[in-house]
């Protein structure tokens, strides 16, 4: 019995080489845009904002069923500020998520056609991206709602009313429930991102139809996908270590050069650190050096991200193709050479 999760490791290398090389500047620039939003691990742009924190002046009995008035009075910001900032943050997060998911579809289209385009595929796929974001939100709400409900009941009823034995049992069962729910949540999201999304591209369908196609394959080949999870984890681990080493070299070298320029500016122009910090021009100059060095390092490192993103997604798609013949998305090297001269073509 062959394990196609292992065989696909080499297949993904061939697919990556066929898609990215020889280097075509316009194609790589567009892939750079996709990589910035999608991310090398497929997670996309994500943002988390801690809007509220528990201040020191919360009443001592807050954990023992504090009233709503006490809780509101203990908030570190006025409610009107939260009411103004929170909706804006949610809208921005949703917009970024939709852009990220749209570019994920665009990348799959590029792999399928060997043509790196942005505008036309994005217009065609944005509806699928919106449905995908909505699906992920519903899944997240569905998993979080029971735990939030239990937390509210504990808060309203008071922890002491359950007794020590009741709280111990609730803690044990609650911990098990959190672990099981967390594993299921991650598996659903990973299955969606890594397998259902490419099926949505192949079949031009929605999320539910994609799962209807994919789930019977999982049920018929559970061991194959279990091996896939292990191999995928090991691949990402190895890639992460390699990325860390390369990133440390790139940012270390550029950071060292930037630090030397900073020393020249401080002592060559202003004479001392105190004089440079006290001067507006000195602060601006030092800040500019820091910003430029970070941007330059990110740009130098970006091709690594493109390679990693292409390889990881090519591996996932190669496993999907091996699982079922109709799920063919990758343009294999022979077809790519015949249709585009061995390199991805570009257009708007």
Image: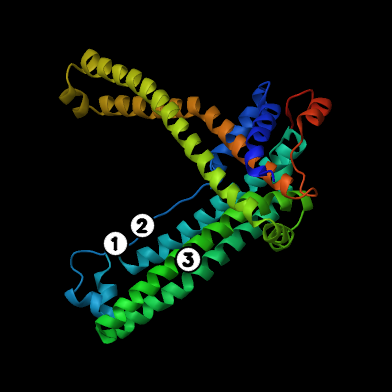
Marks 1,3: beta carbons within 8 A: no
User: Residue 177, percent across and down?
Assistant: 44, 70
| Residue found 44% across the figure and 64% down from its top | 179
| Residue found 46% across the figure and 30% down from its top | 242
Q: Quadrant of the rendered structure where residue 148 is?
A: bottom left
Q: Which mark is residue 50?
A: 2
Is residue 348 visible in this depiction of the protein?
no
Q: Pick whichever, 290 or 144, lies toward us.
A: 144
- For disc 1, the neighbor class at 10 Å (few under 14, some 14 to 19, many from 20) is few
Marks 3,2: beta carbons within 8 A: no
Q: Pick whichever, 20 or 12, lies toward us.
A: 12
Is residue 289 visible in this depiction of the protein?
yes
Residue indicated by mark 1: 53
Q: Is residue 149 above or below residue 240?
A: below
Residue indicated by mark 3: 180
Q: Quadrant of the rendered structure where residue 70 is?
A: bottom left
Q: Is residue 262 above or below residue 143?
A: above
| Residue found 66% across the figure and 40% down from its top | 107
Q: Which mark is residue 121?
A: none
User: Residue 42, percent across and down?
Assistant: 56, 45
Q: Residue furthest top?
A: 268
- Considering the numbered disc 2 on the image, is that residue within a helix, a strand or a loop? loop
- For disc 2, the neighbor class at 10 Å (few under 14, some 14 to 19, many from 20) is few
In the rendered image, the quadrant that contains the C terminus is top right
- For disc 3, the neighbor class at 10 Å (few under 14, some 14 to 19, many from 20) is few
- Considering the numbered disc 1 on the image, is that residue within a helix, a strand or a loop? loop
Q: CA distance from mark 3 to mark 2?
A: 26 Å
Q: Is residue 69 left or right of residue 204?
A: left
- Considering the numbered disc 3 on the image, is that residue within a helix, a strand or a loop? helix
> Closer to the N terminus: mark 3 or mark 2?
2
Q: Is residue 152 left or right of residue 11?
A: left
Marks 2,1: beta carbons within 8 A: yes
């Amino acid at each position: 019995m062959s394990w196609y999760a292992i065989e696909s490791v080499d297949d993904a290398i061939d697919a990556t080489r066929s898609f990215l090389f020889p280097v075509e500047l316009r194609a790589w620039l567009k892939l750079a845009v996709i990589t910035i939003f999608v991310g090398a691990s497929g997670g996309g742009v994500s943002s988390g904002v801690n809007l509220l924190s528990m201040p020191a002046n919360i009443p001592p009995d807050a954990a023992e069923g504090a009233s709503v008035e006490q809780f509101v009075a203990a908030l570190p910001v006025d409610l009107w500020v939260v009411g103004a900032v929170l909706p804006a943050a949610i809208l921005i997060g949703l917009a970024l998520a939709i852009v990220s998911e749209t570019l994920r579809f665009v990348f799959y289209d590029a792999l399928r056609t060997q043509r790196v385009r942005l505008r036309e595929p994005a217009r065609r796929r944005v509806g699928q991206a919106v449905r995908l974001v909505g699906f992920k939100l519903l899944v997240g709400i569905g998993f979080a709602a029971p735990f939030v409900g239990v937390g509210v009941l504990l808060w309203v009823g008071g922890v002491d009313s359950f007794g020590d034995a009741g709280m111990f049992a609730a803690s044990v069962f609650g911990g098990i429930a959190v672990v099981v729910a967390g594993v299921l949540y991650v598996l659903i999201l990973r299955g969606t991102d890594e397998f259902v999304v490419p099926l949505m591209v192949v079949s031009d369908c929605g999320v539910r139809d994609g799962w209807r196609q994919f789930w019977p394959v999982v049920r018929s080949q559970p061991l194959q996908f279990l091996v896939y999870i292990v191999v995928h984890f090991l691949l990402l681990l190895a890639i992460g270590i390699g990325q860390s080493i390369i990133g440390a070299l790139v940012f270390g070298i550029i950071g060292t050069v930037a630090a030397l320029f900073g020393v020249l500016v401080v002592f060559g122009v202003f004479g001392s650190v105190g004089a440079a910090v006290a001067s507006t021009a000195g602060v601006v100059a030092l800040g500019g050096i820091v910003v430029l060095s970070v941007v330059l390092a990110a740009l130098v490192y970006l091709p690594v991200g493109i390679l990693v993103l292409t390889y990881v997604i090519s591996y996932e798609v190669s496993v999907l193709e091996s699982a079922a013949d109709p799920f063919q998305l990758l343009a294999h090297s022979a077809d790519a050479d015949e249709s585009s001269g061995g390199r991805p073509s570009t257009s708007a």
